[in-house]
Image (cartoon, rainbow, N blue to C red):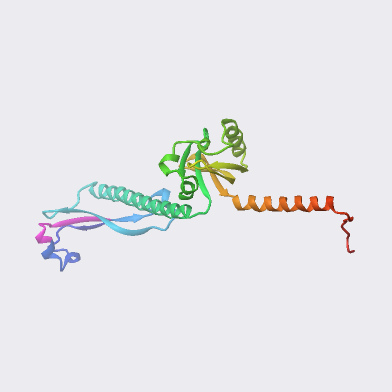
Amino acid sequence: PVVSEDTETDPLWRGFETLTRNFGLRACWSAPLIAGDDEAEKRVPARVYGTFGVYFRTPAAPRDGQMAMLGRCAHLASIAVERNRFEAMLLAEESRFRTFVDHATDAFFLLREDDGMILDVNRRSCESLGYSREQLIGRTPQMFGTRASPQFFREMFATLRRGESVVFDSIHHRSDGTSFPVEIRVESLLAGGERRALAAARDITERKRSEQLVLESERRYRMLAERAQVVLWEADPK
Protein backbone atom coordinates (compact mmCIF):
# COMPACT_ATOMS: atom_id res chain seq x y z
CA PRO A 1 0.00 0.00 0.00
CA VAL A 2 1.01 3.62 -0.58
CA VAL A 3 -0.02 6.32 1.89
CA SER A 4 0.16 10.02 1.01
CA GLU A 5 -0.92 11.83 4.16
CA ASP A 6 -0.70 15.22 2.44
CA THR A 7 -0.54 15.52 -1.35
CA GLU A 8 0.71 19.09 -1.04
CA THR A 9 3.97 17.94 0.57
CA ASP A 10 4.35 14.34 -0.57
CA PRO A 11 7.08 14.09 -3.26
CA LEU A 12 5.11 11.30 -4.97
CA TRP A 13 2.52 13.92 -5.92
CA ARG A 14 5.00 16.54 -7.11
CA GLY A 15 3.76 18.01 -10.36
CA PHE A 16 0.14 17.01 -9.67
CA GLU A 17 -0.61 19.67 -7.05
CA THR A 18 -2.83 21.68 -9.41
CA LEU A 19 -4.88 18.58 -10.24
CA THR A 20 -5.49 17.65 -6.61
CA ARG A 21 -6.36 21.26 -5.73
CA ASN A 22 -8.92 21.43 -8.56
CA PHE A 23 -10.70 18.40 -7.07
CA GLY A 24 -10.22 19.50 -3.48
CA LEU A 25 -8.07 16.46 -2.53
CA ARG A 26 -5.36 16.52 0.15
CA ALA A 27 -4.64 12.88 1.05
CA CYS A 28 -4.65 9.49 -0.70
CA TRP A 29 -4.23 5.94 0.54
CA SER A 30 -3.98 3.26 -2.17
CA ALA A 31 -3.40 -0.47 -2.53
CA PRO A 32 -2.67 -2.50 -5.68
CA LEU A 33 -5.25 -4.63 -7.43
CA ILE A 34 -3.48 -7.93 -8.02
CA ALA A 35 -4.66 -10.61 -10.40
CA GLY A 36 -4.06 -14.08 -9.04
CA ASP A 37 -3.78 -13.11 -5.38
CA ASP A 38 -6.77 -15.27 -4.45
CA GLU A 39 -6.08 -18.89 -3.48
CA ALA A 40 -8.26 -20.14 -6.32
CA GLU A 41 -6.15 -18.15 -8.77
CA LYS A 42 -2.68 -19.28 -7.67
CA ARG A 43 -2.44 -21.29 -10.87
CA VAL A 44 -1.73 -18.05 -12.80
CA PRO A 45 1.16 -15.62 -12.11
CA ALA A 46 0.17 -12.62 -9.98
CA ARG A 47 0.26 -9.25 -11.70
CA VAL A 48 -0.76 -5.73 -10.78
CA TYR A 49 -3.36 -4.27 -13.11
CA GLY A 50 -4.75 -1.34 -11.13
CA THR A 51 -5.08 0.38 -7.78
CA PHE A 52 -7.79 0.84 -5.19
CA GLY A 53 -7.58 4.35 -3.74
CA VAL A 54 -9.26 6.29 -0.96
CA TYR A 55 -9.07 10.08 -1.13
CA PHE A 56 -9.58 12.72 1.56
CA ARG A 57 -10.28 16.45 1.41
CA THR A 58 -8.01 17.12 4.36
CA PRO A 59 -4.58 15.70 5.30
CA ALA A 60 -5.11 12.28 6.88
CA ALA A 61 -2.92 9.58 8.42
CA PRO A 62 -4.23 6.03 8.85
CA ARG A 63 -5.25 4.88 12.31
CA ASP A 64 -5.19 1.36 13.75
CA GLY A 65 -6.92 -1.16 11.50
CA GLN A 66 -7.58 1.24 8.63
CA MET A 67 -4.76 -0.07 6.42
CA ALA A 68 -5.93 -3.63 7.01
CA MET A 69 -9.40 -2.53 5.95
CA LEU A 70 -7.91 -0.87 2.86
CA GLY A 71 -6.15 -4.14 1.99
CA ARG A 72 -9.36 -6.15 2.34
CA CYS A 73 -11.25 -3.67 0.15
CA ALA A 74 -8.54 -3.89 -2.51
CA HIS A 75 -8.67 -7.69 -2.34
CA LEU A 76 -12.46 -7.71 -2.81
CA ALA A 77 -12.15 -5.26 -5.68
CA SER A 78 -9.55 -7.54 -7.28
CA ILE A 79 -11.93 -10.51 -7.05
CA ALA A 80 -14.76 -8.47 -8.61
CA VAL A 81 -12.59 -7.22 -11.47
CA GLU A 82 -11.14 -10.69 -12.09
CA ARG A 83 -14.60 -12.21 -12.18
CA ASN A 84 -15.74 -9.61 -14.67
CA ARG A 85 -12.64 -10.29 -16.78
CA PHE A 86 -13.21 -14.06 -16.78
CA GLU A 87 -16.89 -13.62 -17.61
CA ALA A 88 -15.90 -11.45 -20.57
CA MET A 89 -13.43 -14.14 -21.66
CA LEU A 90 -16.10 -16.85 -21.38
CA LEU A 91 -18.54 -14.77 -23.41
CA ALA A 92 -15.88 -14.26 -26.08
CA GLU A 93 -15.14 -18.01 -26.14
CA GLU A 94 -18.85 -18.78 -26.34
CA SER A 95 -19.19 -16.34 -29.23
CA ARG A 96 -16.27 -17.96 -31.08
CA PHE A 97 -17.71 -21.43 -30.44
CA ARG A 98 -21.15 -20.31 -31.66
CA THR A 99 -19.58 -18.93 -34.85
CA PHE A 100 -17.72 -22.21 -35.40
CA VAL A 101 -20.79 -24.36 -34.77
CA ASP A 102 -23.06 -22.17 -36.90
CA HIS A 103 -20.71 -22.59 -39.85
CA ALA A 104 -20.49 -26.37 -39.47
CA THR A 105 -21.88 -28.49 -42.28
CA ASP A 106 -23.63 -30.84 -39.82
CA ALA A 107 -26.78 -29.98 -37.88
CA PHE A 108 -26.16 -29.85 -34.12
CA PHE A 109 -28.79 -30.39 -31.44
CA LEU A 110 -28.11 -29.96 -27.70
CA LEU A 111 -30.57 -32.18 -25.83
CA ARG A 112 -31.66 -32.48 -22.22
CA GLU A 113 -30.74 -36.00 -21.24
CA ASP A 114 -33.83 -36.98 -19.27
CA ASP A 115 -36.47 -36.33 -21.95
CA GLY A 116 -34.57 -35.27 -25.10
CA MET A 117 -35.92 -31.71 -25.08
CA ILE A 118 -33.96 -29.48 -27.48
CA LEU A 119 -31.98 -26.82 -25.59
CA ASP A 120 -30.05 -25.32 -28.47
CA VAL A 121 -29.41 -25.77 -32.19
CA ASN A 122 -27.02 -24.38 -34.77
CA ARG A 123 -27.86 -22.56 -37.97
CA ARG A 124 -27.52 -25.68 -40.10
CA SER A 125 -30.26 -27.38 -38.05
CA CYS A 126 -32.67 -24.58 -38.90
CA GLU A 127 -31.68 -24.46 -42.57
CA SER A 128 -31.98 -28.22 -43.09
CA LEU A 129 -35.38 -28.55 -41.41
CA GLY A 130 -36.98 -25.24 -42.37
CA TYR A 131 -37.74 -24.23 -38.77
CA SER A 132 -36.49 -21.22 -36.81
CA ARG A 133 -34.32 -21.62 -33.73
CA GLU A 134 -37.25 -20.48 -31.60
CA GLN A 135 -39.52 -23.12 -33.12
CA LEU A 136 -37.05 -25.93 -32.36
CA ILE A 137 -35.95 -25.02 -28.83
CA GLY A 138 -38.25 -26.51 -26.22
CA ARG A 139 -39.47 -29.27 -28.55
CA THR A 140 -38.13 -32.80 -28.95
CA PRO A 141 -36.74 -34.56 -32.05
CA GLN A 142 -40.11 -36.30 -32.38
CA MET A 143 -41.08 -33.08 -34.16
CA PHE A 144 -39.03 -34.10 -37.21
CA GLY A 145 -37.33 -37.49 -36.62
CA THR A 146 -38.71 -40.92 -37.41
CA ARG A 147 -36.79 -42.78 -34.66
CA ALA A 148 -37.36 -40.25 -31.87
CA SER A 149 -39.75 -42.31 -29.74
CA PRO A 150 -39.64 -42.14 -25.92
CA GLN A 151 -38.46 -45.77 -25.78
CA PHE A 152 -35.66 -45.05 -28.24
CA PHE A 153 -34.53 -42.08 -26.13
CA ARG A 154 -34.52 -44.17 -22.93
CA GLU A 155 -32.31 -46.78 -24.57
CA MET A 156 -30.05 -44.14 -26.12
CA PHE A 157 -29.53 -42.22 -22.87
CA ALA A 158 -28.80 -45.48 -21.04
CA THR A 159 -26.05 -46.15 -23.58
CA LEU A 160 -24.68 -42.61 -23.18
CA ARG A 161 -24.58 -42.96 -19.39
CA ARG A 162 -22.31 -45.98 -19.85
CA GLY A 163 -19.84 -43.68 -21.58
CA GLU A 164 -20.59 -44.95 -25.07
CA SER A 165 -21.53 -42.93 -28.14
CA VAL A 166 -24.58 -43.71 -30.27
CA VAL A 167 -24.58 -43.74 -34.09
CA PHE A 168 -27.64 -44.52 -36.21
CA ASP A 169 -29.40 -43.63 -39.46
CA SER A 170 -32.77 -41.92 -39.49
CA ILE A 171 -35.08 -39.80 -41.61
CA HIS A 172 -35.64 -36.10 -40.92
CA HIS A 173 -38.83 -34.41 -42.07
CA ARG A 174 -38.73 -30.76 -43.13
CA SER A 175 -41.43 -28.25 -42.30
CA ASP A 176 -42.63 -28.38 -45.93
CA GLY A 177 -43.33 -32.12 -45.70
CA THR A 178 -40.27 -33.35 -47.61
CA SER A 179 -37.74 -35.67 -45.98
CA PHE A 180 -34.09 -36.65 -46.25
CA PRO A 181 -31.85 -39.38 -44.76
CA VAL A 182 -29.37 -38.51 -41.99
CA GLU A 183 -26.62 -40.20 -40.04
CA ILE A 184 -26.75 -39.14 -36.39
CA ARG A 185 -23.91 -39.35 -33.88
CA VAL A 186 -24.76 -38.64 -30.23
CA GLU A 187 -22.24 -37.97 -27.46
CA SER A 188 -22.75 -37.23 -23.78
CA LEU A 189 -21.20 -34.06 -22.34
CA LEU A 190 -21.29 -31.72 -19.36
CA ALA A 191 -22.75 -28.27 -19.98
CA GLY A 192 -23.20 -25.86 -17.09
CA GLY A 193 -22.54 -28.68 -14.64
CA GLU A 194 -25.39 -30.78 -16.03
CA ARG A 195 -25.30 -33.85 -18.25
CA ARG A 196 -26.44 -33.17 -21.82
CA ALA A 197 -26.50 -35.02 -25.13
CA LEU A 198 -25.01 -33.48 -28.25
CA ALA A 199 -26.41 -34.89 -31.50
CA ALA A 200 -24.76 -34.19 -34.85
CA ALA A 201 -26.95 -34.98 -37.86
CA ARG A 202 -25.32 -35.32 -41.28
CA ASP A 203 -27.34 -35.28 -44.49
CA ILE A 204 -26.45 -38.54 -46.30
CA THR A 205 -28.67 -38.06 -49.34
CA GLU A 206 -25.75 -38.34 -51.75
CA ARG A 207 -24.35 -41.38 -49.96
CA LYS A 208 -27.69 -43.14 -50.10
CA ARG A 209 -28.05 -42.23 -53.77
CA SER A 210 -24.60 -43.69 -54.52
CA GLU A 211 -25.43 -46.84 -52.58
CA GLN A 212 -28.66 -47.18 -54.53
CA LEU A 213 -26.79 -46.78 -57.84
CA VAL A 214 -24.38 -49.54 -56.83
CA LEU A 215 -27.25 -51.84 -55.86
CA GLU A 216 -29.04 -51.07 -59.11
CA SER A 217 -25.87 -51.79 -61.10
CA GLU A 218 -25.41 -55.10 -59.30
CA ARG A 219 -29.05 -55.99 -59.94
CA ARG A 220 -28.72 -55.29 -63.67
CA TYR A 221 -25.46 -57.25 -63.85
CA ARG A 222 -27.05 -60.24 -62.12
CA MET A 223 -30.06 -60.06 -64.41
CA LEU A 224 -27.85 -60.04 -67.51
CA ALA A 225 -25.78 -62.92 -66.16
CA GLU A 226 -28.87 -65.01 -65.48
CA ARG A 227 -30.25 -64.42 -68.98
CA ALA A 228 -26.98 -64.81 -70.88
CA GLN A 229 -26.40 -67.94 -73.01
CA VAL A 230 -22.76 -68.17 -71.89
CA VAL A 231 -21.16 -69.32 -68.69
CA LEU A 232 -19.59 -66.57 -66.56
CA TRP A 233 -17.11 -67.24 -63.80
CA GLU A 234 -14.39 -65.51 -61.81
CA ALA A 235 -10.82 -66.75 -61.89
CA ASP A 236 -7.86 -65.97 -59.70
CA PRO A 237 -4.89 -65.08 -61.96
CA LYS A 238 -2.54 -66.63 -59.42
Could you tell whether 168 is left or right of 52 in the image?
Answer: right
Question: Of all residues shown, which one is farthest toward the bottom?
Answer: 15
Q: Is residue 125 magenta?
A: no
Across and down, in percent, residue 215 comes to 72, 50
Across and down, in percent, residue 28 comes to 18, 56
User: Which quadrant would residue 5 be assigned to in this image?
Assistant: bottom left
Could you tell whether 110 is left or right of 224 in the image?
Answer: left
Q: Is residue 23 above or below residue 161?
A: below
Span highlighted in magenta in the image? 20-31
Could you tell whether 161 is left or right of 175 in the image?
Answer: right
Q: Is residue 25 magenta?
A: yes
Across and down, in percent, residue 191 comes to 48, 43
Tally of numbered tags:
0
Residue that appears at 59% across and 30% down:
151
User: Which quadrant would residue 13 be assigned to in this image?
Assistant: bottom left
Across and down, in percent, residue 122 comes to 46, 48
Residue that appears at 32% across and 59% down:
49
Residue that appears at 14% across and 59% down:
6
